[in-house]
Structure formats: C-alpha cells, structure tokens
Amino acid sequence: MERDYSLYFENAVKASRTIHRLAKTTINTVLIEVADAVIANSAAILEANQKDLDAMSADDPKYDRLQLSTQRLADMATEMKNVAALESPLAEIISADTLPNGLQLSKIRVPLGVVGVIYEARPNVTLDVFALCFKTGNIALLKGGSDAEHSNIAITKVIHSVLKAHDIDVNVATLLPAEREATAALLNAVGLVDVLIPRGSQSLINYVRNNSKIPVIETGAGIVHTFFDISGDTKKGKDIIFNSKTRRVSVCNSLDCLLIHKERLADLAALLEPLAAKSVQIFADEDAYDAVTGSYPEQLLYHASAEDFGTEFLDYKLAVKTVDNLDSALSHISDHSSKHSEAIVAEDEDTINTFLTAVDAAAVYANASTAFTDGGQFGLGAEIGISTQKLHARGPMGLAELTSYKWVVRGNGQIR
C-alpha cells in the first residue's frame, strides 16, 4: 500500500503557524535540555547507531560520517548549547527609514518557513538542523537516508521527548520515513515546503537540483585544492597539507588536490612525508611522480589519470598536480573546483592577494587549513550545511542564513 506523505508536510505547515509564539527563553531552554537529553540517552543512540553501522561496510567512505561515539555525541550537544547561547537573528531590523510622506519602513528578519533537508549517512545533521531551525523559528523537515535510519529515529525521539515536556508541537522537528518515495514526495511538496537543502554527495545534490519543484540551496560537495606557491614556507605547507587531508577525510572540507609550483618540486617529498604515516595514496602527475619516487612509499604512489583531478575522494587519497605559475594554478582550480574551499600557501603578499581575489569559492584561505570551513569554527554555533552557490547564502549556513526578510510599513492613514 502506497504511503501518503502529505500529512507530514501539512503538519509541518501547521507547526510553522505556532512556533513564532514561543518565547526566546523557552527556545533556548529547549535546546539546552535536548543537548542534556542526548547525553543522558547516549547509550540508546549509540545502540541504534551500531545497527546502522552493522549494515555498512567499514570501507565505505560514508562509514566515518555515520559513526557516532560518546565524544561525538558530546560535541553535538556542545554545539547545540552554543546555538542556544547565540543571539537570535529573528526580528532584527536590517534597515529602517521614514519616507517624506511619513510612512515608516522597516526591513526585518523572518524565518524561511518549512525547511526540508535531505541528507545521507550523517546523523549529526538531525540534531544540527533541528537546533538551527528551532532557534530561527523554522520547521525542520528532515529526510535522512536509510543508511542512518535507526540513528535518526533515536535522535528524533530524544528531541520529541523534550518538546512534549514543554507542550510544543513535535512537528517542528519532522523526520520523514527513510524510503526513497518520501524524497520524491518532498521534491514535489509545492506550497507546503519553502526551501530544500541537500547535504551529501554530488550525485544527491544533482538529483535534488534537477528534480525539485521547491527552491534549492546547494550544499556539501567539496573538491578542495591547496596551491603551494614558489614563495611557500615548507613547514607551514607540510602542516597545512597534513591537516587538510587527514584530520577527517570523509568531510567536504578535506583536501583533494595539491597544486605545486614547478620550481618547488624539490620540496614535494618533504611536504608529503607526514601523509605516509596515514597511508595516504598519492596520485601524481609525471613531474610530481618523478620528484617523490624513492622517498614516498612505493605501494602508496600512483600515476594520476585525468579523472583524479576534479574528484572528491572522501578517503585517504590525494591528487598532486604540477603547475607552471599562479595563473596555471588559478586556471586548474577554475576548471575543477566545486567552489567550496580553496587555499594557497605563500609568503609573497601580492600572490596571496591575487589568489584570494581571483578564486571563486565560498571560502578562500591563505596559509591555513581548509579544515576550518565549518559553522562551529566560524563562530556560527553549528551549520546546516556549506552553501556552494551564490544566491541567498554562501559558505557555512548558520542562524542568519536561515532567515529571509520582510518589509514592515507603518502609516497613519496615508493613501497613494
């Protein structure tokens, strides 16, 4: 029997009509209590998560994203409390003016409404999206994948228990069934869902963008480069490359391709040396391959193919490309970037400024790891995703990015 998903959407819309009545103190209290409840119910959440892990190969790049632990739950709870501590952007007056006819205009922040988020093996997204949406008066309409079904249900159960204790409509955090048919229904929920945000692989994002009748904010996929310039500092470069690549390979801000100036190939072995301890596979062009042959472990060194440049590995793999100069690096990034995060290691200030100005990406770095592209690291408390587009929001999406605005006009009988 085919399931009717319209009730999920209709209940979410009804909840959106009441959430604005909640006091800010109530919202913050709920967020703090949910954070505490996550810790208190960590055993049940981890048990559910293990069921999901048992159904996935440990070699799957998504396994690390799916896996929860006591520490990760603690970090998730901390992020939720960070969101509670932030100032709400709702009702913020963006601008105000009085016209010559006496009309008083105010441009104020308001919620987006019902926010649908489609995501894969990332149970932390369930908690992050709820926290950010609830804080901004939005309804979190969550569509997780079947690979994290048990984890998402367990986390949502914790959220709902706190909402019920405060007599708040639990539909402010709606978890759709995990089956694919729910995704199709969500993509077509015109008039019920205000915006869709896909988080996951490029294929997921492409599918949502190509099939949705709802406005979409693209987030997630990262094909990330770091350019080591002729003026680059070897020590800085070594640390930045290692951190960008190995801190957590399954996330979208991890390094995929190292571009190295041809005049610095003699330093490539030193730059890559720490990666060997993590068994990072190197896919190098001919010049780079020759430069590290005999110094980098033979079993981890491969000749690069054209497909290796422009691939989001989400694994212990790194492409290395030799470039003639800054312009060559900029050209390569332009051709292969997903416009997520790009970095340069250089000491020459003119080169740095040119790179930061010319590169078209949501976040551009000079002499720092791309691992910092993160809502928490940017002081946003948490993030609903990293937007790689230019309309409405770009980069880590925090509280302000989950709002729109409306014009409030106060008069005293004026007519036109």
Image: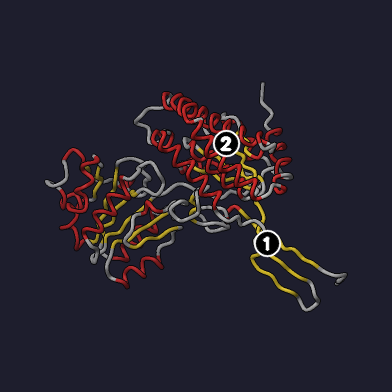
Front in this rendered view, residue 205 or 93: 93
Task: Choose top left, top right, bottom left or bottom right for residue 236.
Answer: bottom left
The image shows residue 253 at horizontal and vertical percentages of: 39, 49
Task: Choose top left, top right, bottom left or bottom right for residue 165.
Answer: top right
Front in this rendered view, residue 300 or 380: 380
- The residue singled out by tag 1 in the image is 108
The image shows residue 53 at horizontal and vertical percentages of: 42, 27
Q: Amino acid at mark 2?
A: Lys
The image shows residue 66 at horizontal and vertical percentages of: 43, 34
Q: Residue at image x 34%, y 63%?
A: 366
SS at circle 1? strand
Q: Residues within 10 Å of mark 2 (few under 14, many from 20)?
A: many
Q: Residue at image x 16%, y 50%?
A: 292
| Label 1 to label 2: alpha-carbon separation | 30 Å
Q: Are marks 1 and 2 in contact (CB under 8 Å)?
A: no
Quadrant for the N terminus, please.
top right
With 228 as the anchor, is 358 left or right in this view?
Answer: right
Quadrant for the C terminus, please.
bottom right
Tell me the tag on residue 9.
none
SS at circle 2? strand
With 249 as the anchor, is 2 left or right in this view?
Answer: right
With 293 as the anchor, is 239 left or right in this view?
Answer: right
Name, please, the residue furthest toward the top. Answer: 1
Q: Residues within 10 Å of mark 1 (few under 14, many from 20)?
A: some
Front in this rendered view, residue 98 or 30: 30
Q: Residue at image x 54%, y 49%?
A: 83
- The residue singled out by tag 2 in the image is 143
Which of disc 2 and disc 1 is earlier in sequence? 1
